Structure formats: C-alpha cells, structure tokens
Amino acid sequence: MKNYLFAGIAALFAVSASAEPTHHDVTFTCPAVNAISHFGDYVAGYGVEAIFGDSRAVYFKTIMWPANVPSNLSTYNSLATNYDSINSLITCSYVSSDANNADFDLHYQMTNGKGGLITAQTPNMISIQFPIGLTK
C-alpha cells in the first residue's frame, strides 16, 4: 500500500512540474538605416527576427506618418527599441542628426506576442522572453 501511495504522490509532483511553462527568447534587430526606404506616405524596411537559432526577415513599417521626414534618410540613426506586451508590437525609433527632420518609429506586429518580458535591449536590438507551454 505504501508503494502505491508513494507512486501516486510522485506522479502528482511530476504532473505539477510539467505544468510549468518553458521560456524562449526571441530577438529582433531593427532595420539598418541603409535598409529602410521612404515610400511617399510611409517608411519601411526589413529587420530580423531570431528564434530557436533560426533567423528570418520581418517587415517594419511606420503606423502614422510624421511630417518633415525627408526622402533621403541618410541622416538618421537608431535611437531606441521598445516592446508593447499588450499589443504584441515591436518598435524601432529613429532620430536624425538634422534638427529640421522629424523622428519616426517603425513597427512590427507579432503574432501571439503578448505577455513577454524584455531581457536585453539596445538602440537597434531587443530580446523578449516568452513563456511557452502549460500554466497552472
């Protein structure tokens, strides 16, 4: 009887332990200034998403068009990155060395990207950790 009770308790602990989610990092690299283009009513370009050791190109685009962004973007540099965990949105901010040019943000909308935590961040890269799996 003791063996059955012990086996039952051990099985309960094993099920509880397997209910914990695992955590995976996803890293986004913003488009380089020489890889973004001005399309007249928006700015866009390809950045990189890296997950599970694989990288793929992802399209970043302005959501709202700021006034005073020139067609030549060579005076711009990466300013900051951000992650909106509620809306699954990655933001790359750019600033110009010319005070007459407006700053702008490029965005990438993730699928199933809610609830992550920022684990690393630079002006042109952001890593986010997501819980994957069952939760209690």
Image (cartoon, grey):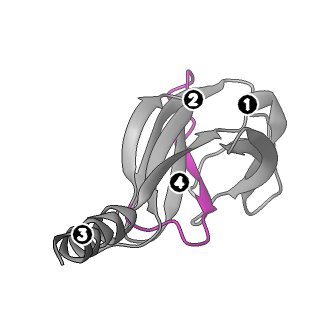
Q: Quadrant of the C terminus?
A: bottom left
Q: Say which label, 2 or 1, has the lower sequence index.
A: 1
Disc 3 crowd rating (10 Å Cα; few below 14, some 14-19, many 20+) is: few
Q: Which mark is residue 78?
A: 2
The residue depicted at 75 percent of the width and 25 percent of the height is: 74
> Does residue 109 appear in this view?
yes
Q: Which residue is mark 1?
A: 33
Secondary structure at badge 4 equals strand
Secondary structure found at label 2: strand
- Label located before the other in sequence (1 or 4): 1
Q: Nearer the viewer, residue 91 or 48?
A: 48
What is the magenta range?
A: 94-115
> Hey, which quadrant is residue 67 in on the image?
bottom right
Give the mark nearer the N terminus: 2 vs 4: 2
First reached walking from the N terminus: tag 1 or tag 3: 3
Q: CA distance from mark 3 to mark 4?
A: 53 Å
What residue sits right under mark 3 in the picture?
3
Q: Amino acid at mark 4?
A: Ile
Looking at the rendered structure, the secondary structure element under dot 3 is: helix
Earlier sequence position, callout 3 versus callout 2: 3
> How far is mark 2 from mark 4, CA to CA?
14 Å
Q: Is there any visible trace of residue 95 in the rendered image? A: no
Q: Measured from the top left, where is residue 115 in percent x and y?
A: 37, 64
State the SS at label 1: helix
Marking on residue 90? 4
In three-dimensional space, the C-alpha distance between marks 3 and 2, rounded to whole angstroms, equals 63 Å
In the rendered image, residue 45, in percent from the top left (x then y), is placed at: 78, 47
Q: Using a 10 Å C-alpha cutoff, classify the residue at mark 4 as few (fewer than 14 neighbours), some (14 to 19) or many (20 or more).
A: many
Three-letter amino acid code at the position of disc 2 = Ser
User: Compared with residue 89, is residue 120 higher up or lower down, i.e. above or below?
Assistant: above
How many angstroms separate mark 1 from mark 3 (CA)?
66 Å
